[in-house]
Amino acid sequence: SASSASSALYWFGGGSGAKDLDEEWERQQEVLKMRRASPEDREKYFKSVDDRRVAASEEQTEKWAWQKKQYKKGEDREL
């Protein structure tokens, strides 16, 4: 039965999902606020998004650069 399945999820730590709904609602309100914002505010927001993306890309590159090392002939690889 559907009600026993949902209560089983809640009982075993799945929760009711209310927190997720609250977070989704808050995020939706942020999106709506940005749609109504002035062009200057929107520009600042998109600049901050671009800055975050650049920083995340740089961090990703730094963390995974070791996997791209190009070994020259005769150079040992550390194990």
Image (tube, helix red, strand yellow):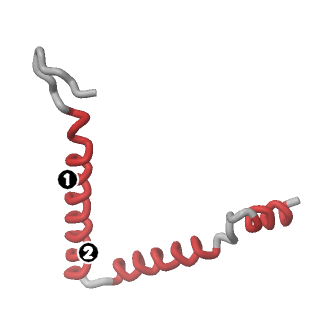
Q: Which residue is mark 2?
A: 45
Location of residue 39 (image quadrant) = bottom left
Give the x, y percent position of residue 2: 84, 61
Residue 9 lies, with reference to residue 42, above or below; the image says above
Where does the C terminus fall, quadrant-wise?
top left
- Circle 2 packing at 10 Å, graded few (<14), some (14-19), many (20+), is some
Location of residue 15 (image quadrant) = bottom right
Residue at point 25%, 64% (across, down): 52
Residue at point 34%, 79% (across, down): 34
Residue at point 20%, 53% (across, down): 58
Residue 50 lies, with reference to residue 76, above or below; the image says below
Where does the N terminus fall, quadrant-wise?
bottom right
Q: Nearer the viewer, mark 2 or mark 1?
A: 1
Q: Is residue 47 left or right of residue 14?
A: left
Residue 3 lies, with reference to residue 54, above or below; the image says below
Going by the numbered disc 2, the residue's amino acid type is Tyr
Asked which secondary structure carries label 1, the reply is: helix
**Residue at the front extreme of this rendering:** 79
**Residue at the top extreme of this rendering:** 74
Going by the numbered disc 1, the residue's amino acid type is Glu
Residue at point 17%, 21% (across, down): 76
Asked which secondary structure carries label 2, the reply is: helix
Residue 71 versus residue 76: which sits nearer the camera? 76
Mark positioned earlier in the residue sequence (2 or 1): 2
User: Residue 58's mark?
Assistant: 1
Residue 35 versus residue 50: which sits nearer the camera? 50
Give the x, y percent position of residue 44: 21, 76
- Circle 1 packing at 10 Å, graded few (<14), some (14-19), many (20+), is few
Q: Is residue 8 left or right of residue 41?
A: right
Give the x, y percent position of residue 35: 36, 78
Location of residue 54 (image quadrant) = bottom left
